[in-house]
Image: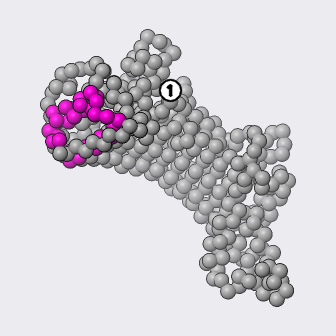
Amino acid sequence: MLEMAAASDRDPFGDLPDELLSRVLSFLPAEDALQTCVLETRWRDLWRRLTSLRFVFDGPTFPRYNRFKRLVKLLICLRGNSPLIRCEIDAYPDDEPENMFTNTRLLIDYALACEAEELIVRAADIQYDLPVFDVPLSLISQHLKTLHLEGVNLDHSALKFSGCLVLEDLRIQLCNIRACEISSMSLKRLCITDYCSLPDIVRLRICAPSLISLQLEDFEGLTPFLENMPLLETAHVNLEDGCHDHCRSNQGVCDNIVCGCHAYPVKEGVLLNGLSNAAKLDLIALPKMFLYRSDLKWCPIFGKLKTLLLNEWFTAVDLVCILRQSPVLESLTLKLGNTEDIVGATGAQETKTQSFVCACLKSVYIECEEVDEGVLAVLNILSTCGILRDQISIKEDSRTDSDF
């Protein structure tokens, strides 16, 4: 088609509106989009006005260092300071012994200087080992609203986003986090997922008083400490094998001084106090994880909680405690695999027998392998709390396990 256009001296896309062509350009990698500038002046003007840049390459197409360096320099020179909305960058090291990621850092600075509202920085998808990019500590922007970091190092004593006054969304995936603190006064949504490595000696503290949504799962290390989040609406927390907050005796306290249970705070909880203002909670863990059970001893009140999902980490005592401390709970979902701990745990039996009524609880959904002794114990607790059998739905599924 381009050969026909050259022969007829006519742009085959000339009849298409600027809005459509700009939309198409926004999906192209930065190098391909830049090459359209040679077509004619109209394309060059459209490219300069692009509000989305994608420095994204897969292994076979990633340019050599010198070519990548020229691409970055040429793009910044030709494009100038035209405003950006979104910038996506594959971090790639310099072809030098120091591997300083000079051009990656230059692109990040350029995106922030162009007032980008969304910035995505990820490790380059290439077929051989490269040094991991250390995200600069001094991310300062009056315009950045969304920051997505994937496969990079966050190797600072503290990740304080005080220089990003309107940052609302922070997503961290596959990252090596060595900070002792993440803090932001403006942050509304935080996701730490996909096998992030967290500190294993001192807990990462999360201070985000404006947070409304939290997702925390698939991490390795100690569970972060959550400070008060008065505006929190929804939270999904999943403590799996990588979490170091488990006890080898499965009791939460043992005599082995190197066991994970000795990392638990003596004078304060870790998670549940910070989650206590949520209206919707998913609390999932392997049964060996003691953290939720230990946090419940601090008796947090879930005064706004209406929807709750649990799996089989809890004991009968824990379930009673949660129900008692959730006065406006309307919907409860229990996904139960192995129910031995529900029946076999010891605890304050008077806590189990003290009657109370879940006045607002309208429906209970139970997913289990079979209606065994543990499920019957749960049904007995619910009956004691005034829940009628016709309010309870039970689904038996042999595939039910701890992975939700």
Q: Residue 197 sits in which quadrant?
A: top right
Q: Is residue 80 visible?
A: yes
| Residue at (65% x, 42% y) in the render | 152
| Residue at (39% x, 17% y) in the render | 253
Q: Is residue 386 magenta?
A: yes
Q: Is residue 73 magenta?
A: no
Residue in front for this viewpoint, 357 or 214: 357
Q: Quadrant of the C terminus?
A: top left
**Where residue 35 sits: x, y (%)?**
78, 69
Q: Is residue 7 left or right of residue 127?
A: right
Q: Quadrant of the N terminus?
A: bottom right
Of all residues, the one furthest to the bottom in this rendering is 8
| Residue at (83% x, 80% y) in the render | 3
Q: Is residue 238 visible?
A: no
Q: Which residue was labeled with disc 1?
A: 244
Q: Residue 195 sits in which quadrant?
A: top right
Q: Residue 119 sits in which quadrant?
A: bottom right
**Where residue 212 sits: x, y (%)?**
40, 50
Specify few, some or many for label 1: CA neighbours under 10 Å numbering under 14, 14-19, or 20 or more. Answer: many
Question: Dot 1: what SS?
Answer: loop
Considering only vertical position in the picture, is 293 above or below 88?
above
Q: Amino acid at mark 1?
A: His
Q: Is residue 167 left or right of residue 154?
A: left
**Where residue 70 sits: x, y (%)?**
83, 59
Q: How is the image coloured?
A: one colour
Residue in front for this viewpoint, 138 or 61: 61
**Where residue 217 sits: x, y (%)?**
48, 39
Q: Which residues are magenta?
A: 360-389
